[in-house]
Structure formats: structure tokens, C-alpha cells
Image (spheres, grey):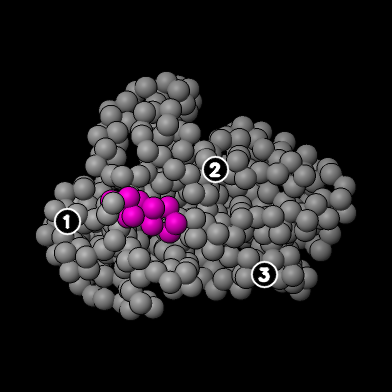
Amino acid sequence: MRIVDVAEFYSPTGGGVRTYIDRKFEAAAQLGHELFVIAPGPRDAFERRGAGGVIHVRSPSLPFDANYHMFWDAAPVHRHLDALAPDLVEASSPWRGAWIVARWAGTAPRAMFMHADPVASYPQRWLAPVASPQRIDQLFDWFWTYLRRLTGCFSSVVTGGPWLSERLGQQGVGAVTSVPLGIDHGAFSPAMRDERLRSELLEACGCSNQARLVLGVGRFHPEKRWPMVIEAVTRVRAEVPIGLVLVGDGIDRNRVRKAAAANPHVRILPPIRDRALLAAHLASADALVHGCESETFGLIPAEAMASGLPVVGPDRGGFAHLAQPSISELYRAGDAGAAAEAIRRLFARDPRTLKDAAIEAAVKVRRDIDHFADLFDHYGSIATGARA
């Protein structure tokens, strides 16, 4: 099957979407499919990937993030779709790229993969002090009306986990299918633990080996709530020696650095592109603290769990569906005090029991090859139905 993904937010310097699509290419080759990605970029270019590749279409950059570009002219995208003659076209954002796919004159069936929930990511976070999530959904009914109209042009709407499927269904979006994401078990494992690395990270935080090493990994973006994570860990430090290492970068870097500046036990590291090195960092820590309640799956928490790492995270969003009571603690989303209490609860557990549970849970995390096999099977059924 030949699949073309019109990926509006794919960038070689991007975050989760880039990681996901890179793995998608590997899985497509392994499972015998051709995958092409059409993405906006600084210039027209083609990057070969197995039997397919990335087609970059020259497009203007996003004004608020130079890592990304935005589709403008539909004609070059339509020309590429005509030339590729795909069995199925996927749009992986609900914005300009999706409308370009919807208005293509070709006959191939179309699916939309929703990688994010814009209302949960932005207005529900901005307006949380003054309105409930339900009230904010009502205030942004114009977006849900827009999304229902857009998705009506697609044969299927796919999500990476049940949380977003439930959200979309509650807002009247039809033909929604949940295909839960997964992680690369070949890269992430408790066997990657490195005691020397752990000691070095704790030393960088000004802590002894007896302290707890806590990680936070992800883009520095307001929705990730890193200043809140720093505040929560700082509150706990008065009772439990803790070093916090944040791995990432992004548009919120100044706020993150300001939040960490007064705390000598917080260390900020640049993004780790080497998967083996990232896996070693995860496996060598004592816990991951996650702040984002609007992710549809929670890729980093899943990679942490596969690395044998307990996780503290919010009670809304994709992580809440992933969380296993034996190795996780939930807190009220967006609340630093509640997050601090969750960290205290986790570290109050018996260390040996917690470690044994984390190692046992690691092998149960869903594999990404299973996600892609299910996704391509779903797309194949759509393509077969369209031909019938």
C-alpha cells in the first residue's frame, strides 16, 4: 500500500511529530508499505527514506516558531499527490494541510490523524483559573463546529489513544478510531541503567548519590508546564533530597531558565537526539515528573515506563490512561502543590517494591510496531472499502 502523509508539523528539528514520523518510515519498510511525507519547509527538496521519502514544499515559516513552516499554496501539494497516486492520504493536523487534502481532486480515500487537542493545549490551560474545562469547551464551540465540518471530508479520524477519542466523540466528531501509540522496545529498557551516569547527573545538580534523581523530558513549551514541575520538585526538596534534570529546549526556554535560576539542584540539558543516550538517562533516574495534561498519548512517560522508571503525572490527558497504579502517582492537572504531594507519595513507597514493579511493568508497555501494524491495517481496510 502506498500512503502519503501531508504532515504540516513535520520538521527535522521538531519534537514528538518528527520522532513519530521517523519511526513510521521504519515501520512502513518493515511491514512492506510505501510511505511518502509531504511537509512544508524552507525550500523544495526530496529526502529518500526506504521505498518512499520526505517531499519538502517551499513554504513560509511560522511566525512564532522558526523550527516549523506552514503550507500556503495548495497547488504544489496537489501536484505531488497526483504524481504519487496514493492508496490513502493522511492529514496529520486540523489546519491548512487538512483543507489542502480535503480539496484535492483525487479519488484516494483520506484519513485525519489528530496528534493534538488544541482546546486542551491552549484555552483550557490559559483559562483554567476562571472556568472549568467543560465551560471552556462550550466557549470554544466554534472550534468544535469547525472540526466537525472539516472531518466530514475524511473517511476516518484516527487518534493515538482513547483519551482524545473520547474527547472527540463527546464533541460530535464522527468516524473516530483509537489506534494507541507505542514505543520502541529495542531502544528503551531497564537494562540501559548506568550508575555512573546517574552519579554524574546528581553531581551536576549538587547532590550526593543518596539523593533521588528526577527527570523531566520534552519541549520547552507552555503546555508542558516546566515551571510548575520545578516548583513541585522544589517544594519536596525540603523533606527529600532531590536533583531535577530537565532535558529539552523550545520557545518557553526563558521562563524555564528563570524558574530554575534560583535552584542550584536543577540542571537543564539540551535535547538528546541520540536515542540510546536518552534511554540511558531515563533508565538511570529514580522517577519522571510529567506536567502536560493535553497530550493524546504521553510518549515520553511511556518511554520512561519501558525504561523501568516510575512516573508522576497529571490526572487528565493521555498519561492518565497510561498510568499504572503500581508505578505511578496522579495529581490534579496544573497544580504544583498537588504535584508535590504526588512526588512525596511516590518516594514514600518501599524502594525495592517500587523498583520491582517498575521492571515488571516495563515489558507491558505497547510496542510502536504494534501501533503501526494496526494503523496500516486500518488504512488498508479504508482503501479496500473505497475500491469495492
The residue depicted at 48 percent of the width and 73 percent of the height is 30
Say which residue appears at 36% left-offset and 33% top-offset: 173
- Observer-nearest residue: 128 or 20? 20
Quarter of image, res 272: bottom right
- Of the pair 285 and 31, the residue shown nearer to us: 31
Q: Which residue is mark 1?
A: 106
Return the residue at label 2. Answer: 318
The region drawn magenta spans 376-386
- Front: mark 3 or 1: 1
- Mark 1 and 2 residues: CB-CB less than 8 Å, in contact? no
Name the side, left or right, on which 112 lies relative to 259: left
Q: Amino acid at mark 1?
A: Gly
Is the residue marked by circle 3 packed among few (<14), some (14-19), or many (20+) residues within 10 Å?
Answer: many
Query: Which secondary structure lies at badge 1?
Result: loop
For marks 3 and 2, give the CA distance: 24 Å
**Looking at numbered disc 3 in the image, what kind of residue is underneath it?**
Ala
Closer to the camera: disc 1 or disc 2?
A: 1
Residue 34 lies in the magenta-colored region: no
Q: Within 10 angstroms of label 2, few (less than 14), some, or many (20 or more) residues?
A: many
- Tell me: 322 left or right of 65: right
Residue 161: x %, y % from top left: 51, 45
- Going from N to C along the chain, the mark reached first, 3 or 1, is 1
Q: Amino acid at mark 2?
A: Gly
Separation (CA) of disc 1 from disc 2? 35 Å
**Residue drawn at point x = 41 percent, y = 34 percent:** 168
Q: Which residue is mark 3?
A: 280
Q: Mark 3 or mark 2, which has the lower sequence index?
A: 3
268, above or below 344, in the image = below
In terms of secondary structure, where does tag 2 sit? helix
